[in-house]
Each structure stands twice: as structure tokens, then as C-alpha cells.
Image (cartoon, grey):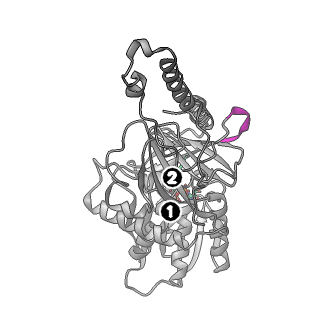
């Protein structure tokens, strides 16, 4: 559903703006009443020194109601981060068996799932006739997209997985369509950049076909916010065109209690709805799901299927022995839903994303941390930071 930003004819002036204007008015009237002796014939000093009033905000947005008694849960997930980037690569297991790896998408596994799956299916099948059967290991966003693309090529697919949604990292994701936190630019190669761009573009295109209530995918305006001016126009890099409607908003023309706001539109993919719908598609197309925890690649090589795609996310570290793969622990504190909140706000490393099942507050990434226990200190910081920000926004605080 294309999002619209509610446009108001104007908004009541904020207390601080009222204060500024009220003080200036008092100063002018005081000078007019008694100042004839002081500076007759000169313009009142206040008129020269008062700051130019900011333009009025061109639109209004409701503020999130942040308080500890509105928290409904805090969830934790381990982003599967590989500094050199996600791995899509085939390995010959011998005896005519091919394994294609498809894991390590960091903070963008949902975002990149369809594009990365596309690359994996190319790797598995290429120009050859598709195999009659294939297996996918893993039932997160990446495994499901891979399984569906194989089915679209006419392949009979079985998913083998240790856990099903809702017990996957993909269920913890927000999930904003945002191809970031995927790799380390100091480490990844230009060849990876090309693959990454291709995956992002394919994924962006396929997710557009899933917009609607059935898949829980919709367009939302995003507002990165900053006290300092943004560096350059638009989203950085080669993917700028995937962030339609990018524009910088002048101080005072937006409803946020900071000077600088940028606006662009992305898709929001609600994992509880999305993953369930894709599993349903998979099963309707004849796909089967088997619960199985693989302890080694030897076990994988023992499967009846001779074509296998490994989509085990952070689980690949143990399964494959890939020590480059590290967890980037993230957590989200979820508040009671507020259906009127239809925008994403990102400020000082914190972010707020609205979903049907709650308002997500996040902003953590703990590298190398394996614990699935919530970090209470981080939770406190995130809730307090958002309470302060949205409290100021609700009061119409000025800069
Ligand atoms: C707080 C937070 C916010 C995030 N926000 C976003 C976001 O806004 N946008 C975005 O795109 N991404 C986001 N992410 C990242 C995203 O969650 C991951 O990149 C993504 O879930 C990875 O998907 P996956 O399918 O590879 O892994 P998973 O979802 O972890 O799925 C892996 C599957 O493999 C199975 N498995 C693992 N090991 C084995 C084994 N040995 N044998 C059998 N099965 C196995 C698991 O049971 C599971 O089914 C976020 C992550 C976190 C933690």
C-alpha cells in the first residue's frame, strides 16, 4: 500500500516558538511604550537581533507513546554477519552431489533473500535442465525464498530444518527493506559489490510483487534524523534509485524535534505475516518440510536429494566450520501497537519501526555476542532514548 504522509493545513505553534515570538512581541511593545527617549527614530533592536522564525512544518505526524508500561516484549536475534559478504558458492560433495551455500546476510537477510536465492538457484542449476528434486536446509527468509524459486523452476523441494518460524532469526527481524550491515567495506571485494547490487535489485523487484496484506509487505516513509546536515543528496552509493522519493527537508518544515530530516520510502516486510504466507505458498506448491538438525556436512551428503542449498544463517558457522561468520546480536523492545504510526524514524543510532503487532524500538549490534538473553542495559537506553525523543516531538518542541 503506498503510504501517504498526512498533510495538515498548518499546526499550532509550539510552546518554544510561542515563547520566542511572545518575547519579541513584549520587547517591541515595551520599546514602543517607553522607548521614545531611548532610541527615538531607530528600529527596535529586537527586530534586528531576533532569529528568523523557522518556516512552519509542512506536515504533521503523530508521536509514538513510549513508556515502560507499554512494553509487551523484548526479543533477541543473531544477525549472521560475514565481513567479506554473504556466501553463495557451490561445493562438490562427491558422487554427483552438489551443495550450494547461501548464508551470511548480516542485518539484511530478509531484504536480500529473493536476490540471494536467485543467485543460489543460478549456481545450482545454471543453464542445465533443473533436477527433479532438491533439498533446502533452513526455513528462515533465505531458505523459503530459495525453496520457492526452485519450485518455480519445476523442482520438487523438501525443506529440512532444525526450527520453524516463529523460532528463526528471520522472525526477529523488523524487517525494513534495507540492504545495509551486510559486509565490511574494508574487507569485501568489488566482485562482491557487484553480486550484492544484483541481489538487492532482484530482491527489491520481487518484494514489490508481494505488497499487500496477504504477505504483510507495505511501503512506508522513512525519516533519518540528524542534528547536523546530511553529507550529500539521497541514499549513498549505487542503490540510490531503490529509495524512491528521497529528499532532504529544511529545518522547521518537518515535525521532528531535530534540525535535519531526510525522507525516502522503503518497503516494510512484517515477518510474522510474511513468513507464514510464504510457507503456505511452498506447501500449496507441493513442498514438504522435515524437522532435522544437521551436525555435519557428512549428514548433508547422506540426503536422498543430490542437489542441496544450505540456508542455515548463523547455524552455518558450526555446520560448515566457517569461522568468518560471526553473530551481530540485536534486540528489539516492542510496545503496544499504535496503528496511527505510519512512518519509520532513525535517530542517533536508534530506530522506531511500526508493525501491526507492535511498535519496534531498536538500535543494538553486539558483535561476537552469542547470548540470546536481552541486554537490560541496552533496553533501558533504547526505551529512554525514544521516550525523550517522542516526548519532545509530542510537545512540538523546537530546535
Ligand atoms: C534485531 C534485528 C533486526 C533485524 N532487522 C532486519 C531488517 O530490518 N531487515 C532485514 O532484511 N534484516 C534484518 N535483520 C537480519 C535478519 O534477521 C537476518 O539477516 C535473516 O533473518 C537471516 O535469514 P536466514 O534465513 O539466513 O537465517 P534464519 O532466519 O536464522 O534461518 C536459518 C534456518 O536454518 C535452520 N538451521 C540452522 N542450523 C541448522 C542445522 N544445523 N540443521 C538444520 N537447520 C538449521 C534454522 O532452524 C532456521 O530455520 C535483523 C536482525 C535482528 C536480530
Question: Magenta includes 307?
Answer: no
Q: Left of 13 or right of it: where is 266?
A: left
> What is the quadrant of residue 237 in the picture?
bottom left
Task: State yes or no: Cβ of the residue under disc 1 lies below 8 Å from any atom of ligand 1.
Answer: yes
Q: Write down which quadrant ligand 1 falls in.
A: bottom right
Measuring from the top left, give residue 302's x and y in whole percent: 52, 69
> What is the quadrant of residue 71 in the picture?
top right
Q: Residue at x 54, y 43 (%)?
A: 255
Q: Left of 338 or right of it: where is 265?
A: left
Locate the N terminus by quadrant: bottom right
Q: Nearer the viewer, residue 209 or 58?
A: 58
Which residue is labeled 2 in the image?
222
Q: Which residues are magenta?
A: 67-74
Q: Left of 193 or right of it: where is 393?
A: right
Q: Nearer the viewer, residue 217 or 88?
A: 217
Q: Nearer the viewer, residue 212 or 339?
A: 339
Mark 1 or 2: the one toward you: 2
Answer yes or no: is residue 72 visible.
Answer: yes
Q: Residue at x 48, y 68 (%)?
A: 114
Query: Sequence order check: which comes first, mark 1 or mark 2?
Result: 2
Measuring from the top left, give residue 192's x and y in whole percent: 31, 60
Residue 87's place in the image compared with 338, above or below, is below
Amino acid at each position: 500500500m503506498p503510504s501517504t504522509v498526512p498533510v495538515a493545513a498548518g499546526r499550532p505553534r509550539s510552546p518554544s516558538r510561542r515563547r520566542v515570538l511572545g518575547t519579541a512581541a513584549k520587547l517591541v511593545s515595551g520599546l514602543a511604550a517607553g522607548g521614545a527617549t531611548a532610541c527615538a527614530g531607530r528600529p527596535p533592536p529586537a527586530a534586528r537581533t531576533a532569529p528568523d522564525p523557522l518556516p512552519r512544518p509542512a506536515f504533521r505526524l503523530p508521536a509514538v507513546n513510549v513508556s515502560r508500561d507499554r512494553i509487551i516484549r523484548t526479543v533477541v536475534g543473531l544477525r549472521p554477519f560475514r565481513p567479506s559478504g554473504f556466501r553463495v558458492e557451490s561445493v562438490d560433495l562427491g558422487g554427483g552431489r552438489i551443495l550450494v551455500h547461501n548464508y551470511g546476510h548480516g542485518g539484511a537477510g530478509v531484504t536480500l533473500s529473493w536476490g540471494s536465492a536467485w543467485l543460489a538457484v543460478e549456481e545450482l542449476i545454471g543453464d542445465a535442465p533443473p533436477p527433479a528434486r532438491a533439498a533446502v536446509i533452513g526455513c528462515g527468509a533465505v531458505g523459503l525464498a530459495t525453496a520457492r524459486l526452485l519450485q518455480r523452476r519445476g523442482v520438487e523441494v523438501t525443506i529440512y530444518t532444525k526450527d520453524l518460524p516463529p523460532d528463526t532469526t528471520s522472525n526477529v527481524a523488523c524487517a525494513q527493506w534495507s540492504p545495509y550491515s551486510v559486509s565490511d567495506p574494508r574487507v569485501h571485494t568489488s566482485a562482491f559489490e557487484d553480486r550484492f547490487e544484483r541481489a538487492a535489485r532482484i530482491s527489491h523487484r520481487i518484494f514489490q510483487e508481494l505488497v499487500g496484506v496477504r504477505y504483510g509487505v507495505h511501503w512506508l516513509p522513512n525519516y533519518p534524523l540528524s542534528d547536523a546536515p546530511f553529507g550529500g543528496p539521497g541514499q549513498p552509493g549505487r542503490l540510490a534509485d531503490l529509495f524512491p522519493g528521497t529528499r532532504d527537508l529544511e529545518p522547521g518544515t518537518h515535525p521532528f524535534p531535530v534540525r535535519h530530516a531526510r525522507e525516502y520510502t522503503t518497503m516494510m516486510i512484517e515477518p510474522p505475516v510474511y513468513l507464514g504466507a510464504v510457507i503456505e505458498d511452498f506447501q500449496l506448491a507441493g513442498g514438504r518440510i522435515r524437522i532435522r538438525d544437521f551436525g555435519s556436512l557428512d549428514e548433508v551428503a547422506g540426503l536422498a536429494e543430490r542437489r542441496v542449498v544450505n540456508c542455515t544463517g548463523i547455524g552455518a558457522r558450526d555446520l560448515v566450520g566457517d569461522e568468518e561468520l560471526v553473530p551481530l546480536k540485536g534486540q528489539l523492545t516492542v510496545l503496544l501497537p499504535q496503528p496511527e504510526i505510519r512512518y519509520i524514524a532513525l535517530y542517533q543510532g536508534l530506530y522506531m519501526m511500526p508493525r501491526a503487532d507492535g511498535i519496534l524500538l531498536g538500535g543494538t549490534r553486539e558483535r561476537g555476542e552469542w547470548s540470546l538473553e536481552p541486554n537490560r542495559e541496552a533496553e533501558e537506553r533504547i526505551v529512554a532514548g525514544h521516550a525523550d525523543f517522542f516526548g519532545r516531538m509530542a510537545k512540538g518542541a523546537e530546535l
